[in-house]
Image (tube, helix red, strand yellow):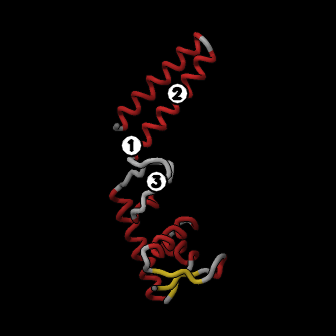
Amino acid sequence: MNNKTQGIISIVAAIVVLLSAIWSPVVSLVMAVVALVGMGVAQLGIRGKGAGERDSSPLASLGTQNDAVLINPDQVKMHQEHLEKVMGMARAQGQVANDEVERALGVSDRTASRYLQELEGQGKLVQVGVTGRKVSYRLK
């Protein structure tokens, strides 16, 4: 189901719920719950994944667990460039820390952590330390 179809279904559902409120608040509540459940099922169909399934691709970190991953080619390119810069930093310095990635790339703490964890997951970096400021990553 494409976005246009989903939008039309959402508008029709909203109109039906509003009209049902005229007849009875209970009917309106029941219809609203049915509409919300239907939209949730439609979202599962859009993602192509069942409940509990996760995308294990390297680009999975670009989206959230609850949203469909919409891939923008420019974002993919920037993501890959950032990962390459992090690897270059690790090669040049022997190891790299989260705060260094933040400053070098101009990204948030969480984004820097995701980049480092993604490279660790790919087997390119190894985490040194457990938590806090002493954590860094070195080449594997």
Residue in the picture at 55% in, 15% down? 20
Q: Amino acid at mark 3?
A: Glu
Q: Quadrant of the C terminus?
A: bottom left
In the rendered image, residue 104, in percent from the top left (x then y), is placed at 50, 75
Question: Residue visible at 47% across and 34% down?
Answer: 39
* Disc ID at residue 85: none
Q: Nearer the viewer, residue 7 or 122?
A: 122
> In which quadrant of the rendered view does residue 130 lie?
bottom right
Counting residues from the start of the chain, the first of labels 1 and 3 encountered is: 1
Vertical side of 40 occupied by 86: above or below? below
Q: Position of residue 106 (x, y in %)?
A: 51, 69
- The secondary element bearing badge 3 is classed as loop
Residue type for callout 2: Val
Q: Quadrant of residue 8?
A: top left
Q: Position of residue 52 (x, y in %)?
A: 50, 52
Asked if disc 2 and disc 3 are in contact, CB closer than 8 Å, the reply is no
Residue receiving disc 3: 53
Q: Is residue 7 above or below residue 95?
A: above
Q: Which residue is mark 1?
A: 46
Report how far apart the C-alphas of labels 1 and 3 lie in the structure.
Answer: 14 Å
Residue found at x 50% / y 24%: 14
* Residue position for label 2: 34
State the separation of the CA atoms marked 2 and 1: 18 Å
The secondary element bearing badge 1 is classed as: helix
The residue carrying pointer 1 sits among few (fewer than 14), some (14 to 19) or many (20 or more) residues within 10 Å by Cα, namely: some
* In-front residue for pair 128/109: 128
